[in-house]
Image (spheres, helix red, strand yellow):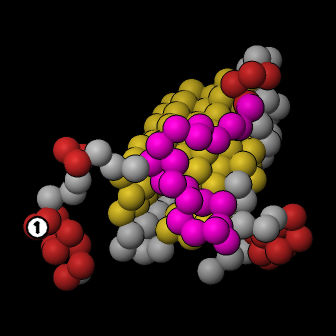
Amino acid sequence: MFSKKNVDSMTNNNKTLTIIGEGVVINGSLFSPGVTRIDGKVVGEITAEKELIIGKEGEVEARIKTKDATIAGSFKGNMIASGEVEITSTGKFTGNLTQKDAMFTIEKGGVFKGESAISEDQKIFEIKQQEENKTPLSENTGTSFTQQKPQDKIPENHLKSNLLM
């Protein structure tokens, strides 16, 4: 499930691992102080302080701010990364990439459709958790989600159809 490089970085450098598993759908904002792996679907905004991994089955449509990123699934949107970005042989990246340095790799078979730019504006690479509307999942995790307003709730029939799959 994880490459050797990713397992080492998770166990040695990070306290928090956030996994969005296959079949899980998140619409909204996600903040993680550690490594984040997405094998499900996320639509919205993602902030990952350490590393973002989009697995082969992962689908992401979002604005992303992270240090490092590995794309093995599908990504559509805008990404700001202060470190390395890798598109694997199964990865598809559609959108704009802004980096601090030119540390961008595309493996043979990987797809990149969009623009890649280097920015000298250090402020855009700062990762800060917005305290407003954040609710911790528990005392033991650093992961939080934006609270839904009543009008933003997912229709009940949508939940049932996803649970039956």
Instruction: Out of 46 and 80, give the one closest to the viewer.
Output: 46
Which residue does the numbered mark 1 point to in the structure image?
A: 157
Which residue appears at 72% of the width and 67% of the height?
A: 16
Which residue appears at 79% of the width and 22% of the height?
A: 122
Main SS of the magenta segment? Answer: loop
- Image location (x, y in percent) of residue 63: 50, 37
Position of 94 compared to 14: left or right?
left
The image shows residue 5, relative to residue 43, as above or below, that is below
Looking at the figure, which quarter contains the N terminus?
A: bottom right
Which residue appears at 23% of the width and 48% of the height?
A: 150
Q: Using the rendered view, name the quadrant where residue 65 is placed.
A: top right
- Image location (x, y in percent) of residue 28: 40, 47
Q: How many marks?
A: 1
Q: Residue furthest right?
A: 12
Assess disc 1: are there few (<14), some (14-19) or many (≥20) residues with their C-alpha within 10 Å of its C-alpha.
few
Looking at the figure, which quarter contains the C terminus?
A: bottom left
Can you see residue 96?
yes
Q: Secondary structure at mark 1?
A: helix
Position of 81 compared to 96: left or right?
right
Q: Residue furthest left?
A: 157
Magenta stretch: includes residue 119: no
Which residue appears at 66% of the width and 60% of the height?
A: 142
- Image location (x, y in percent) of residue 109: 57, 57
Q: Residue furthest front?
A: 139
Can you see residue 53?
no
Instruction: Out of 130 and 74, give the one closest to the viewer.
Output: 130
- Image location (x, y in percent) of residue 96: 54, 31
Position of 24 compared to 125: left or right?
left
Mark 1 residue type: Asn
Magenta stretch: includes residue 130: yes
* Segment tinted magenta in the rendering: 126-146
